[in-house]
Amino acid sequence: MRKEYSQSSLEREHLCDNPFEQFSRWFEEALEFEPHEVNAMTLATVDSNSAPSARVVLLKSFSADGFIFFTNYSSKKGGDISVNNRVALLFYWPQTMRQVRVEGSAFKIDPSESDEYFNSRPALSKASSALSKQSSPLENRDEFDKRVNTLLGSGAEISRPDNWGGYSVKPDHIEFWQGGVGRSHDRFIYSLEGSQEWSITRLYP
Ligand SMILES: Cc1cc2nc3c(=O)[nH]c(=O)nc-3n(C[C@H](O)[C@H](O)[C@H](O)COP(=O)(O)O)c2cc1C
């Protein structure tokens, strides 16, 4: 059953001074109200010609240090980030009529943290990640499945490949958008602008 969500306006006094606390509050509410994939976010990157590219990845954790997701470092997105680590993340939570836009720089996380997460994954995910050349042409899907099953069946310990791990996106801008029923929408952007202090600005909808 869909829960009714009633907040329809956002005022400065509703907002936390710190954008990570604000994100955490909205994320908790999204967990309560959104039926699916609350942690799914669109990741936008650009390549060496500044051509943009976007895809969905899963947010695994967040803190004041950044927003963390895991992927194949040799993938299209990994290649893009290696030439330009400026990225954008986008969350859309329709039940609460909310959007969060994050802009910042992506950095590989410490390999020990990637090991820890990789080792916690189910065997099938490990085998598939270990053998996938993510974003490269795949000529024969059956052959890939066979290799995954052979690796699984061997019972061998599957360790994290060097080209698989996490990125942390350290933001300098985070915008919170609240849709309203029967009124115009509200937008507030938190910006670092070279300082250590976050400023908060209301934007025209
Ligand atoms: C709901 C959803 C969650 C996904 N989560 C991830 C993820 O956490 N990591 C990842 O590498 N790809 C994830 N994918 C697949 C990506 O969208 C994408 O197809 C893949 O990473 C290759 O992207 P690239 O070729 O731009 O590098 C997910 C896709 C969907 C639809």
Image: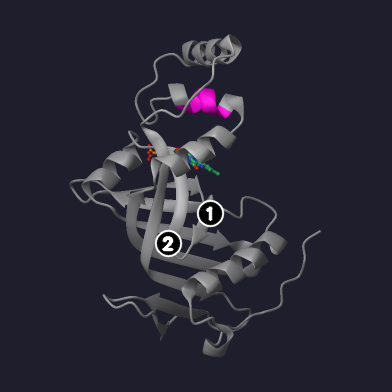
Q: Is residue 33 left or right of residue 64?
A: right
Range shown magenta: 125-129
Q: Quadrant of the C terminus?
A: bottom left
| Depth check, front residue: 192 or 92 | 192
Query: Residue 65: which disc?
Result: 2
Based on the displayed image, in which of its 4 quarters is residue 114 positioned?
top left
- Residue type at the position of mark 1: Ser
Q: Which residue is mark 1?
A: 61
Task: Give yes or no for residue 102 being in the magenta stretch.
Answer: no
Main secondary structure of the magenta stretch? helix
Residue for point 77% across, 61% down: 2
> Where residue 148 sits in the image (x, y, percent)?
52, 16
| Depth check, front residue: 121 or 186 | 121
> Where residue 173 sits in the image (x, y, percent)?
37, 70
Query: Residue 50: which disc?
Result: none
> Where residue 88 sits in the image (x, y, percent)?
37, 58
Residue 97 seen by the camera: no
Q: Residue furthest front?
A: 112
Cα distance, mark 2 to mark 1?
A: 10 Å
- Residue type at the position of mark 2: Asp
> Where residue 87 sits in the image (x, y, percent)?
33, 56
**Label 1: how many residues lie within 10 Å, few (<14), some (14-19) or many (20+)?**
few
Check the image and report above or below for 72 versus 88: above
**Label 2: how many residues lie within 10 Å, few (<14), some (14-19) or many (20+)?**
few
Residue for point 56% across, 29% down: 125
Check the image and report above or below for 1 versus 16: above
Task: Give yes or no for residue 126 being in the magenta stretch.
Answer: yes
